Image (spheres, rainbow, N blue to C red):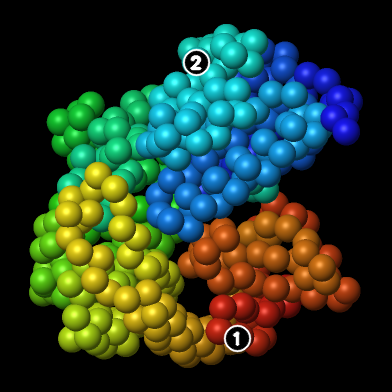
Amino acid sequence: MRTKSTLKNTINVITLGCSKNTYDSEVLMGQLKANKKNVVHQKKGNIVVINTCGFINNAKEESINTILKNTRLKELGEIDKLFVTGCLSERYKEDLRSEIPEVDQYFGTSELPSLLKVLGADYKHELIGERIKTTPLNYSYLKISEGCDRPCSFCAIPLMRGVHKSTPIENLVLEATKLAENGVKELILIAQDLTYYGLDLYKKRNLASLLKELVKIKGIEWIRLHYAFPTGFPFEVLTLMKNEPKICNYLDIPLQHISDNILKSMKRGTNYEKTTELINKFREIIPDISIRTTFIVGYPGETENDFKLLLNWIKKMKFERLGCFKYSHEENTSAYKLTDDVPEKIKNNRLSEIMQTQRNISHKLNQKLVGRIFKCIIDRKEGKYFVGRTEMDSPDVDNEVLVDASKFYLKKGEFVELIITEASDYDLFAIPFRAN
């Protein structure tokens, strides 16, 4: 029997996918709040907006399953209206309309004003930096540009996010200042490619100029860099990182592969020699830098020799942080013209082998941290532990520092000095330094 929802005029925003979607959802909710709308995040409401991801197969499946789950809730009368936005909707809007007509309306990644209109709200251009945060109080993502101009053969991001478009420095400084005034201590800079920042607005790579302005903001203590591209890297950023204590000695730089044959097919604009030289140069300039990278296994034409070269290179380079994905054959990318010829079983085996190798590397690196003292930020309390991070770790994807909450009290959102007492593959255990 159909029952009518009792949650009147409450808009529930559901966020799927990456940190860029998190940012977009926060902006959407900020706009809705400014329009006096009752908005919640991933709770309950009679109006649902799903911010989807369409990057790879697993993400697309999660998005589709979430849409279908909410169409069933709509049929049962538990929700009244259902809207879908984000990357999946941008990429497959017509297909989705045909296959899942129960959704009231679909919107792309650049259609925020239209989405707001159907929700009974006006897009307010003056709301620079006004967001409803979904992350812990102490950190926030700062999206410095949208879209991407890179030609990577496997990537569908330009299809969903468009061409690269930088946000002006003055707008980002204003947004970051407002975040700091509301208690944010750590800015995590995100983009499809940080290193491309400014080329469209300032006719030069201008990430260093942006960073010089952000470090001036009172209350911001850490600035972390995500998603740099390995070609054309602006080394003045490394110099700034070395000399400016607010900029974390941390860099997320997805490398994707190391075989020259695969890199050429991927259209990455680099090779084994140049990539090795780049990583070595990073570590020469900043010896204690933590480098996070990601790789793809099972790309079309990846031979056993290509994979072994990658695996051995990972063993040699000993990255502090590493993720790995199976190749996803995505329509309308240039790699889609290739034959997806690596069997799924082999993809899974290669993925497992790389992650086991990284687990061993991480374990050995973590053991060297025992006895050392680190400045850590406390993100949350979970179970019997306070959970924090060092400068070397980004939220959700990297190591965490665990402190026994039954023995010590730590304030969430604050920095504290911790001494590492024990380490596992991906977790560090600690006690407060100079604990009372």
Residue 433: in sight, yes or no? no
Q: Nearer the viewer, residue 197 or 164?
A: 164
- Above or below, 205 against 314 in this view is above
Q: Which residue is rendered at x = 68% and y = 30% of the image?
A: 48
Query: x, y (%) of residue 90?
Result: 41, 33
Frontmost of labels 1 and 2 is 2
Q: Badge 1: how crowded within 10 Å, few (<14), some, or many (20+)?
A: some
Location of residue 14 by image quarter: top right
- Above or below, 279 against 164 in this view is below
Query: x, y (%) of residue 212?
Result: 35, 41
Query: x, y (%) of residue 407?
Result: 86, 76
Q: Is label 2 in a helix, a strand or a loop? A: helix
Image-based side of 50 in relation to 273, left or right? right
| Residue reaching furthest to the front | 1
Location of residue 403 by image quarter: bottom right
Residue 424: mark in rendering: 1
Counting residues from the start of the chain, the first of labels 1 and 2 encountered is 2
What count of labels does the image hold?
A: 2
Kind of residue at badge 1: Ser
Mark 2 sits on what residue? 113
Q: Nearer the viewer, residue 297 or 253?
A: 297
Q: Which residue is rendered at x = 60% and y = 23% of the image?
A: 104
Measure how far apart labels 1 and 2 are at the Cα level.
Answer: 47 Å
Q: Which residue is rendered at x = 69% and y = 24% of the image?
A: 81
Whether the residues at callouts 1 and 2 have beta carbons within 8 Å, the answer is no
Residue 152: mark in rendering: none
- Above or below, 353 against 136 in this view is below
Q: Which residue is rendered at x = 59% and y = 14% of the image?
A: 118
Kind of residue at badge 2: Pro
Q: Which part of the image, by quadrant, shows the N terminus?
A: top right
Q: Which part of the image, by quadrant, shows the C terminus?
A: bottom right
